[in-house]
Amino acid sequence: MQEMRAAEDLCAGTVYLQGVKLFYRQAEANARARAAAARLVGADPEDIALTQNTTHGMNLGVASLDWRAGDEVISATTEHPGCLAPLHALQRRFGVRVNLISPPMSAEKLLQAITPRTRLVALSHVDWTTGEVFPLADICAAARERGILTLVDGAQSVGNIPVDAPATGADMYAFTGHKWILGPEGMGALYVRPDCEVPSYNVGYASIAEGASFDIEGGYALRKGARRFEASTMSPILAAGFAAAAEAVHERGTEGFEGIRHRADRLMDSLSGLLRVTLRSPRPARSGLVSFEIEGIEPKDAAERLLQQKFVARFIPAPNSYVRVSTHLFNTEEELEDLTRAVSGL
Ligand SMILES: Cc1ncc(COP(=O)(O)O)c(C=O)c1O
């Protein structure tokens, strides 16, 4: 009998210990992911919440305001559904007016669109349709002076161009690990300015302040930092993958970003030599995104035909209906030439 109890104790102890170890392993992986994400955007790890992807971060940001019918949000006509769909949800749910302006984006254009009801500006850092970089610092400063929050879609910027999220002046800046960071799908991050005091409504045990004990009446404090937006358990495997990828991109530093732009310029040089190709990205390249049109071929068909030749081109829908390709850290000169030949072949 005594032996059985001892065995039970031992077993319970082992399971408990394993649980504790697992919990700490997860906490460690998450901390490493937050630190890697923070380094990549020039922020403090305290100001980073882990998310699933950019769109998740955009939804968290949008949901942090107490919307009223008639409130307004400003965005751009060229934004991705990851930015616009959460805004359309506000429109449907609260009667918020979504005011879309057409790029090129500038603080002057923003100022013209602002009304006394404007509460949020939600914009990309890098325009996914052309690779243009929006003048975020000016835009965010103009919004801030008028007490308007800014939420940035960094899906196409982090890992593509150097990003200093605090220097952009954005209140919240969402990005993902699976695009330019080359990490696994399923983990991203949301930077939240330390003085941006919007509440989080995505809450659970993970958002409760350190040392505060949970009580069923709700009289406990939430974390003050960005982690108030993290609700619960996440995958340590994704966190480890995200961290390793973000660390590797960060190590490439300025040289890595220059290489990305250099390859985009090289590609644009050779594509511009093709008779029926019109480039739609700014030159010199601002990022690794290269958009173009081919006279007489629908962008969707062109993207599909390039895919058949193993070039992953993207079809961008209206209003900027283009074919888009990306040049990244590891693309070779030979690949750029092969792609130009493939486009020429179309
Ligand atoms: C500008 C932009 N925003 C958002 C997204 C969606 O990103 P995620 O899958 O990280 O939510 C994309 C995807 O292509 C994008 O280009």
Image (cartoon, grey):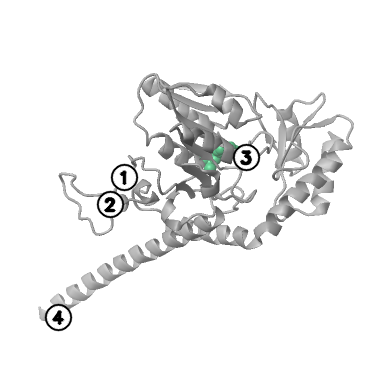
**In the rendered view of the protein, which quadrant contains the C terminus?**
top right
Report how far apart the C-alphas of labels 1 and 2 lie in the structure.
Answer: 8 Å
Residue position marked by numbered label 4 in the rendering: 3
Under mark 2, the amino acid is Ile
Q: Earlier in the sequence, mark 1 or mark 3?
A: 3
Q: Position of residue 223 (x, y in %)?
A: 31, 51
Under mark 4, the amino acid is Glu
Any atom of ligand 1 within 8 Å of the CB at mark 3? yes
Image quadrant of residue 248?
bottom right
Residue position marked by numbered label 1 in the rendering: 203
Query: Which disc is residue 208 wearing?
Result: 2
- Picture residue at 34% right of the left edge, 30% below the top: 66
Q: Earlier in the sequence, mark 1 or mark 2?
A: 1
Q: Position of residue 94 (x, y in %)?
A: 37, 22
Q: Earlier in the sequence, mark 2 or mark 4?
A: 4
Q: Position of residue 211 (x, y in %)?
A: 24, 59
